[in-house]
Amino acid sequence: MNKWRLLTAVGAILLFVLVSWPRAAGSDAAVLAEPVPIHDGIVLRVYFDDIETARRIAISYEPLQSNYEEGYLLLAVSPLERDEIMAAGLRVEEDAHLTQQFAQPHRPPPRSEERRGGKESR
């Protein structure tokens, strides 16, 4: 009989935690609604002479965009990564406009209850 009481108590506690979890997570909504920069890096056009070089760059830095006709990859990198790329002897151009766009604060979309102006009915 004690085994059943223990199982019932554990089940009730588990049920309570599962039911209250979304409410506890919602308390962080104010923190998550703060604008955050998309990234704090630099957007570069890194030029290449051959497809093998382009492949090695793409594997190492995951490009935002590629333009094989003009021979460059668009990368978002940290200052340290920029220095590594330049030390490798690659031709690099910083895209100041895209760097500034990426640095603009980004607000996450409002939760459904905030869009309606009140609490969501369940």
Image: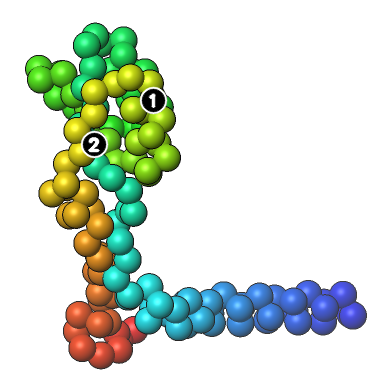
Q: Residue 87 carries which label?
A: 1
Asked which secondary structure carries label 1, the reply is helix
Q: Residue at x 29, y 71 (%)?
A: 35
Q: Nearer the viewer, residue 119 or 67?
A: 67
- In the rendered image, the vertical position of residue 77 relative to residue 40, given as above or below: above
- In the rendered image, the vertical position of residue 105 relative to residue 29, given as above or below: above
| Residue 9 point in image, percent of width and height | 76, 82
**Quarter of the image holding residue 6?**
bottom right
Question: Which residue is tagged 2?
Answer: 44
| Residue 28 point in image, percent of width and height | 44, 78
Asked which secondary structure carries label 2, the reply is strand
Q: Which residue is drawn at 9% across and 17% down?
A: 69
Q: Name the outermost residue toward the bottom.
A: 118
Of pointers 2 and 1, the one earlier in the residue sequence: 2
Q: Which residue is drawn at 53% across and 77% down?
A: 21
Q: What residue type is labelled 1?
A: Ala
**Quarter of the image holding residue 20?**
bottom right
Tell me: 77 left or right of 3.
left
Q: How crowded is mark 2: few (under 14 residues within 10 Å), some or many (20 or more)?
A: many
Q: Name the outermost residue toward the right.
A: 2
| Residue 59 point in image, percent of width and height | 38, 24
- In the rendered image, the vertical position of residue 118 relative to residue 85, given as above or below: below
Q: Residue at x 20, y 39 (%)?
A: 94
Tell me: 8 left or right of 21.
right
The N terminus sits in image quarter: bottom right
Q: Residues within 10 Å of mark 1 (few under 14, many from 20)?
A: few
| Residue 38 point in image, percent of width and height | 29, 56
**Quarter of the image holding residue 103?**
bottom left
Tell me: 70 left or right of 76.
left
